[in-house]
Amino acid sequence: MLPPLTHRKAVATASFSPAGDRILTGSADGEAAIWDSASGERLATFVHPQGVLLASFDPSALRVLSAC
């Protein structure tokens, strides 16, 4: 079982990378985060000026798109 992928406020969006090895979440705390789907380790954080409403990987999984 995967440990909780925690943010300081509610998660508004989550998506898996095309290969399923990463999870991208976006939260009302203004952060989008990339997680390792096997370990739950946070790999990267992107800070936004307000809550993140949408976050998705591009088909190559080399880039992400996030929107407030």
Image (cartoon, rainbow, N blue to C red):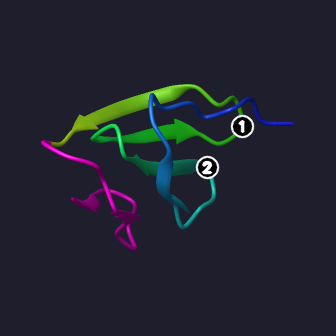
Q: Quadrant of residue 40?
A: top right
**Foreground: 28 or 64?**
28
Please tell me which residue is depicted at 60% across the width and 34% down the height of the picture.
5
Q: Position of residue 27 (x, y in %)?
A: 40, 46
Q: CA distance from mark 1 to mark 2?
A: 7 Å
User: Up-down: is 51 above or below 6?
Assistant: below
Q: Is residue 60 magenta?
A: yes
Please tell me which residue is depicted at 54% across the width and 67% down the height of the picture.
18
Please tell me which residue is depicted at 69% across the width and 32% down the height of the picture.
4
Q: Position of residue 8 (x, y in %)?
A: 45, 28
Q: Amino acid at mark 2?
A: Asp
**Foreground: 14 or 62?**
14
User: Sequence order check: which comes first, mark 1 or mark 2?
Assistant: 2
Query: Quick check: marks 1 and 2 in contact, CB under 8 Å?
Result: yes
* Residue 44 shown left or right of residue 49 in the figure: right
Disc on res. 38:
1
User: Up-down: is 45 above or below 59?
Assistant: above
**Magenta residue span:** 49-68
Q: Position of residue 37 (x, y in %)?
A: 65, 42
Residue at the spot of label 2: 21
In the image as oriented, which residue stretches furthest toward the bottom? 59
Q: Position of residue 2 (x, y in %)?
A: 78, 36
Q: Amino acid at mark 1?
A: Ala
| Mark 1 residue element | loop
| Mark 2 residue element | loop
Q: Main secondary structure of the magenta part?
A: loop
The local crowd at label 1, few if under 14, some if 14 to 19, many if 20 or more residues have their Cα within 10 Å, is few
Disc on res. 12:
none
Q: Is residue 5 magenta?
A: no
